[in-house]
Image (cartoon, grey):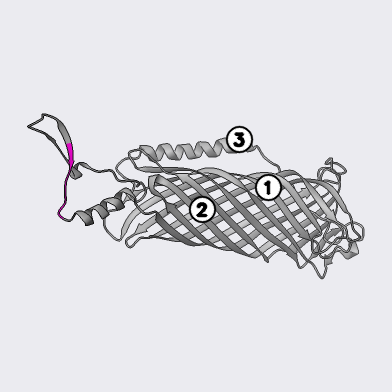
Amino acid sequence: MSLITDDVVSEQPYGNRCGRMICIFTMMATVVLFLGLTAGVCLPQSVFWGTDSWGPENSVHFLSQSSGKSDDIALKPENSDSNLETQAKKQHPSPRIELTTGLNARRDSLDWNIAGQKDGTNPNVLSELTWDNLDIWELTLGIQIKFKNNFYFQGDMSFGAIVAGENQDSDYGADDRQDEFSRSNNNADDGFTFDTSAGLGYMFSLASKRLALIPMAGLSLHRQYLTMTDGYQTIYADDPSLEGPFDGLDSSYDARWLGPWIGFSLRYCFDMGTGFLRRISPRGDLEYHWARYHAEADWNLRSDFEHPKSFEHDAWGDGFLIRAGLGFEFQGNWSLVFAYVQQDWQAEDGVDRVFLSGGGTMETRLNEVNWESRAIRLAFNYKF
């Protein structure tokens, strides 16, 4: 539908998702193999730790001359109380906590499209809406906790401000995006994003403790609050004289992706010695998400729609998150991480439900929703 007559969104091919999954997992497996075969480096002790066992220095093995029996006798230190306390700390270490704050430069795009009827016909794409080149400045906060016995928790939260972007709204009279009778091109330089995720995993030591592999599972929420202002009617077949800028456009589309995920994290460490730069750590993350998609919109120029909730979308979807980074660990528990983050999400076969100003609702098919995100991250970490 146009902003002044109908609602809209854009359709893109869903793609060969199975082939994409195989490709991604193959690339990650190649990285694991390469790192595992690389020699001469070790993970820092802080990456792999757990309950320390008594070592050879803590006991004496001797043959009793009187009985001929073999015994293990614990050494009795001079200050038994202080040593018992130290031994207790070794056997029950405190969790290691790492805090993160970062700034991301991010670019997103989101599109959706609907059919004319619930069965996906008349036409198969009635309206489509796209948001492209959404430039976002994002602040990230995170925490990682390494428990004893190698259990691992991570959580993060990000808030982004949209500072630039473009929007297009198109309506079609025939199948396959033919007979376009309305199009508007609008500004999308406002709005925000919000993302939060938490996961629990377990650390495994590979390749003689050169590599940390952390299978994980968790829950995440991703939100995009998108806007449309400064309307410009590019095509209006019914009355071309109305083409051009129009006043009063202030519409919004609020999308949310909520659901569980599984994945794994890789950490590798090059020991740089005892100088100011202690370690360099390549790292990577891969996550597969299931999501319940829900969105609510306010089409402010549509007098035949309710306000502030003009229509809503519901669908099931999924998505991938890939993160690749390089960490630099310095003296004093500080580290710096550069990372690239890519997300690709889809939802399809959903419901578009319109709320009419006179009461009642209308429903049609939500064909699909596509969301893509690319970000470059600079983060500072501190370990306790």
**Residue 11 in the figure: left or right of residue 379:** right
Amino acid at circle 2? Tyr
- Viewer-nearest of labels 2 and 1? 1
In the rendering, at what x and y percent does residue 57 appear?
Answer: 18, 44
Residue 19's tag is: 3
Mark nearer the N terminus (3 vs 1) = 3
In the rendering, at what x and y percent does residue 360 appear?
Answer: 89, 55
**Image point (35%, 60%), residue name:** 333
Residue that carries the numbered disc 1 in the rendered image: 292
Please identify the residue farthest to the front as the structure is shown: 66
**Residue 17 in the figure: left or right of residue 171:** left
Write down the quadrant of residue 40 in the picture.
Answer: top left
Mark nearer the N terminus (2 vs 1) = 1
Residue 340's tag is: 2
Residue stretch in magenta: 72-78
**Mark 3 crowdedness (10 Å alpha carbons): few <14, some 14-19, many ≥20:** few
Element carrying mark 1: strand
Question: Could you give the CA–CA distance between mark 3 and mark 2, rounded to whole angstroms?
Answer: 22 Å
Q: Is residue 196 above or below residue 75?
A: below
- Viewer-nearest of labels 3 and 1? 1
Q: Is residue 7 above or below residue 151?
A: below
Amino acid at circle 3? Gly
